[in-house]
Amino acid sequence: MSNDWVEVCGKDDIDEEDVIRFDHNGRTYAVYRSPDDTFHATAGLCTHEQIHLADGLVMDDIIECPKHNGRFNYKTGEAKGAPVCVNLQTYPVKVEGGSVFIQVS
Amino acid sequence: MTLDKQTVVIIGAGECGARAAFALRENGHTGKVVLIGAEPLHPYERPPLSKAGLADGAEPVYVAPRQRFAEQDIDLKTAVSVTGIDCAARQVALSTDEQVAYDALLIATGATARRLPFGPKPGKRILTLRTFEDALNIRPHLGEGRHLAIIGGGFIGLELAATARKSGARVTLVEGLPRVLSRGVPASIASAIAARHSAEGVDLRCGVSIAELEETGKEATIVLTDGTRIVANLIIVGVGAAPNVALAESAGLAIDNGIAVDDRLRTSAAGVSAAGDCCSFPLALYGSRRVRLEAWRNAQDQGTLAARNILGHDQPISAVPWFWSDQYDLTLQVAGLAEGAATHVTRRLGGNAFIEFHMAQDGRLLAASGISEGNAVARDIRIAEMLIARRARPDPEKLSDPDIRMKSLLN
């Protein structure tokens, strides 16, 4: 729990009910702000066809892939039905001093 | 008879049939599910066939691993075709001489690539693209030093042109109409796509007509009516697809540009539904106009809906037509049907990305069509799709202002 926390952005750099892409050490992540103002992070690519989820639409707890509308619960990573059947990896997130951090290891 | 003991037979193991089979299980069906596919492969996705699926060594992208069908107790029969449907006896005859009885039947036979009404029979150098096997046959003709001639400026033709150019092959694309993508895509977007193909070196010839195709040895030639000869290593005919209705027709089902179904996907025969590319259906959102869609998502949506309705859910078709196309790094997405629109506005998203919104006379949003590099138009198109489904009349000024979040229009 020491130095594997990585700063993503300022809290207000993500709109409510929205997502941004975050690249770090050659990997890509999607970082979310929910409508009830909590922050979450998942792997950045859809498990169906390796599409960046950050171009997708966030509605409530769901991120929808911009390509084929595969849906995941971004809080749990759970795949919500065709065409996706493999869950998304999720990562711990914390907000400190107005910034959002994710634990990437 | 209880639902639990019912046998559901699905003819056609493409996207639609496979989705329906899984949806039956997801919705609690415990009776038998028999999924019958004529192709040797288990269900795979067709959209990649004109793109990454043409790369050397690319494997099919399967809808699900084969073992998942067994895990879900789906009796998947591949390389088996259905030779007849007996609606009175409620059974289908298979190419293996078996008879399979059904309580409910779903026909999801898809469509077949159209051929030109003239020229030699398709041979080694005049091909169409619909199946994984077709893709395997096309692969050796891609790459530097090759010349591909494509007939038809629709999605298949244009996606193939992009893939072939990326492989280094020369590409000539001929289209009979004055522009590419005449069907279902606004002129401004078609023109942006055409410009990109030209910039990538595709020899694009619109408004030409073909007199003859010839196939000789290692060459295939398109002869235009003005005498021009386009000599290529391979001709690909991409002039649309025809619904596979022969089986349904010989069983006496009503046909109307596809197997005619009602808004619950029921055919004219009791206990028989049809879904996906093979059927035409009334679209309530558009005045119950009868349409037939050849689209991946429609196949999925209708497969799911057919399964639910077979199990008694009694839900009407409500999905908004939606499709996409990838060419080079461009993505095109269209939600809705722009036909009959009275006005349109454009939303410019920066770079070359833009969306055209088409509205009816009364301001109702009918369609949104967008193009961008990557997926920059995806979320706005998705929100537009929701607005279309709600029959919303969004303020055109807000639609055209990229600084106003589309999401705010949902409130």
Image (tube, rainbow, N blue to C red):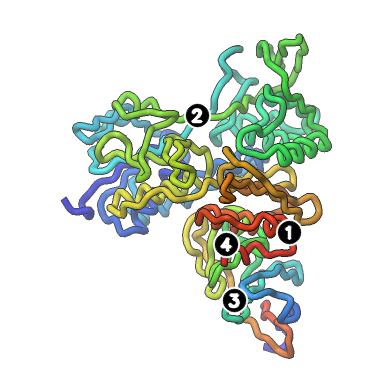
Disc 4 is attached to a residue of which chain? A
Farthest-out residue, left: B1
Secondary structure found at label 1: loop
Whether B337 is drawn above or below B395: the answer is above
- Taking the image as shown, residue A43 lies to the left or right of residue B33, namely right
Residue visible at 64% across and 59% down in the picture: B379
Residue type, label 4: Glu
Whether B7 is drawn above or below B123: the answer is below
Q: Which residue is mark 2?
A: B112
Of residue B363 and residue B91, the one placed in the foreground of this image is B363
Label 3 environment density (alpha carbons within 10 Å; few <14, some 14–19, many ≥20): many
Disc 3 is attached to a residue of which chain? A
**In which quadrant of the rendered view does residue B169 lie?**
top right
| Same-subunit check for callouts 4 and 3 | yes
- Taking the image as shown, residue B392 lies to the left or right of residue B160, namely left
Q: Which residue is mark 1?
A: B401
Instruction: Tell me the mark number nearer the camera, choosing from 4 and 1.
Output: 1
Task: Return the x and y of residue B151 as percentages of the image width and height.
Answer: 67, 24
Of residue B304 and residue B133, the one placed in the foreground of this image is B304
Q: Which residue is mark 3?
A: A34
Residue visible at 63% across and 66% down in the picture: B408
Q: CA distance from mark 2 to mark 4?
A: 31 Å
Residue B76 shows in the view? no
Residue type, label 3: Ser
Mark 4 touches mark 3? (CB < 8 Å): no
